[in-house]
Amino acid sequence: MIRHLPLAAFVALLAAGPQWLPEFHITLLNYIGLYAIVAIGLVLLTGVGGLTSFGQAAFVGLGAYTTAWLTTQFGYSPWATLLIGLALTGAVAFLLGFITLRMGGHYLPLGTIAWGISLYFLFGNVEFLGGHTGITGIPTVSLLGWELKSGDEFFYLIWLVVLLAILGVRNLLDSRQGRAIRALKGGGVMAEAMGVNTPRTKIVIFLIAALLACLSGWLYAHLQRFVSPTPFGINMGIEYLFMAVVGGIGHVWGAVLGAGLITVLKQWLQDWLPHILGQSGNFEVIVFGIAMVLVLQKARDGLWPVLLRLLPASARQRRLVDAEALPRRSPAAAGSVLLTAEGVTKRFGGLVANNNMSLSVQAGEVMALIGPNGAGKSTMFNCISAVNPASEGKIAFLGESTAKLRSRDIARRGMSRTFQHVRLLGQMSVLENVAIGAHLRGSKGVLAAALRLDRGEENRLLAEAAKQIERVGLKEHMFDAAGSLALGQQRIVEIARALASDPCLLLLDEPAAGLRYQEKQALAELLRKLRGEGMGILLVEHDMDFVMGLADRVVVMEFGEKLAEGEPEAVQRDPKVLEAYLGGVE
Ligand code: ADP
Ligand code: MG
């Protein structure tokens, strides 16, 4: 309850606002609300998703101009034009997103600048949109028969939208889809290997951000009852990004804080700087630039986390609810062949990391892939799981060629893996990291998550994650940030994550590295148990005692090629293997 006190106080203050605040402050708050709606979208897109957009102002313009034009020229109801505006923005954003989101690195921000500028000039130069003079005479909005004529009245509508947007985005982030979104920044490869469709997820958050911007534009048009191109230019696009960054790029409430700070500061600077400097001009932009650099220097995550630290730490532990177990896939017949790789070659430019490699894994066996560092074992894993597909060769999983499959398709068919260089989301809890592994065992979408209609499924996913965490022996770390664990334990978290997908084939890349003796024993025990249940396990490991005590068959690699294959005892006696490992001492 205590946790919700600040929010309740904030809402109460807002609700009472128009009774006691002067009109000028209400106007300011209206603008803060409008900007915050756009900034909330940017927190999701840029802060959480890692996709930088300078072009959000153009979507605000799209929402504003659609309603301005259709209501004044054709007498449409504002509510109808809201829907049309959202549909139009959705279509434009889908198209732009489809083109620009595929561009990596700095191409995306550049792309957003390009379309931000294009749309701005479109508004200014199309005759029927009023050119640079804009459109006047936009009608008021009526809500359930209540006409919102004044800023005071509009205030309620704006802040209702702000609060709903915050609630929706927060709900979304705390869900199956939300975990996929949070994995985009820095965890794309891992997310794909866990079955997340990352290109689709990027488009989804791009659309949400654009639709929120459009909504803000619609509100703006009916508040002002006048639109011109100026507020939808690239300057404003940059300012929106400022707001999100200054407020707290990864925090939904930071958007409100940022919008508030920048708006008030701008107002204040515009009033005072000309007095101080004795001449007029847009000096506030310079101050903003400097302030931005300072914030990025001193508080990289923005000001919201700084504010949060002032509040008493609230118990953030999530309650786990008992939930019905998720359905499991039907197991492969014992001894049936799960995986075959034949003639697999992988080149990195001139380097041949895998050369004509072949191996197979059956249900209910542990196959170990061993060899000196740089032999090409991890590369082989990447070929098999299509994280980095082979240049040549045939790989079949469950009798189906994987040549045309992406890593997420292979994950869906029942192969899961860990990474030698641990790929966890360090800020997220162990529970949430492991739950990403269960992504494909849920189906609820973004809308269901935003509206909290996904709780039944979410509880089952989290219960599954918790079960796997317990199984690998990390129960007491369930709610700790994954990044705070020892490296050896982080590898075990990766195993739990892989198990959460209910695989029939498990690929483990050096799972025992960094573990203590007892921990290795426990891991071996777990793997034996999994084997007993019929799972196929392909294992890369350097600890020979560990491998030889566990593996049913061993493939030895050297310089990208297969050196030997067979049962552990035979391989251990193989002179070629001894040569490779011991330099032929014996
Ligand atoms: P292992 O896992 O057996 O230690 P790797 O498969 O990681 O070996 O590496 C095999 C060889 O391929 C090494 O020489 C490594 O430098 C090279 N290699 C691996 N990944 C890449 C990559 N993405 N680009 C270029 N070279 C790579
Ligand atoms: Mg390796």
Image (tube, rainbow, N blue to C red):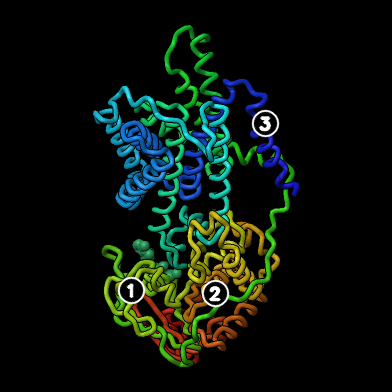
Q: Residue at x 46, y 55 (%)?
A: 184
Q: Are marks 1 and 2 in contact (CB under 8 Å)?
A: no
Residue 91 on image: x %, y %:
33, 49
Q: Earlier in the sequence, mark 2 or mark 3?
A: 3
Q: Residue 499 carries which label?
A: 2
Q: Residues within 10 Å of mark 2 (few under 14, many from 20)?
A: many
State ligand 2's quadrant. Answer: bottom left
Q: How crowded is mark 3: few (under 14 residues within 10 Å), some or many (20 or more)?
A: few
Which residue does the numbered mark 3 point to in the structure image?
A: 16
**Does residue 255 appear left or right of residue 350 in this picture?**
right
Residue 212 on image: x %, y %:
46, 43
Q: Which of marks 3 and 1 is nearer the N terminus?
A: 3
**Does residue 266 appear left or right of residue 381 in this picture?**
right
Disc 3/disc 1 C-alpha distance (Å): 69 Å
Q: Which residue is drawn at 66% across and 69% down?
A: 474
Disc 2/disc 3 C-alpha distance (Å): 52 Å
Q: Confirm whether residue 358 shows in the render.
A: no
Label 1: element kind: strand
Which residue does the numbered mark 1 point to in the structure image?
A: 354
**Does residue 438 appear left or right of residue 192 in this picture?**
right
Ligand 1 is within 8 Å of the C-beta of the residue at disc 1? yes
* Residue 235 position by quadrant: top left
Residue 299 drawn above or below residue 47? above
Disc 1/disc 2 C-alpha distance (Å): 27 Å
Label 3: element kind: helix
Q: Which of marks 1 and 2 is nearer the N terminus?
A: 1
Foreground disc of the pair 2, 3? 3
Q: Confirm whether residue 252 shows in the render.
A: yes
Instruction: Give the amino acid at mark 3.
Output: Ala
Foreground disc of the pair 3, 1? 3
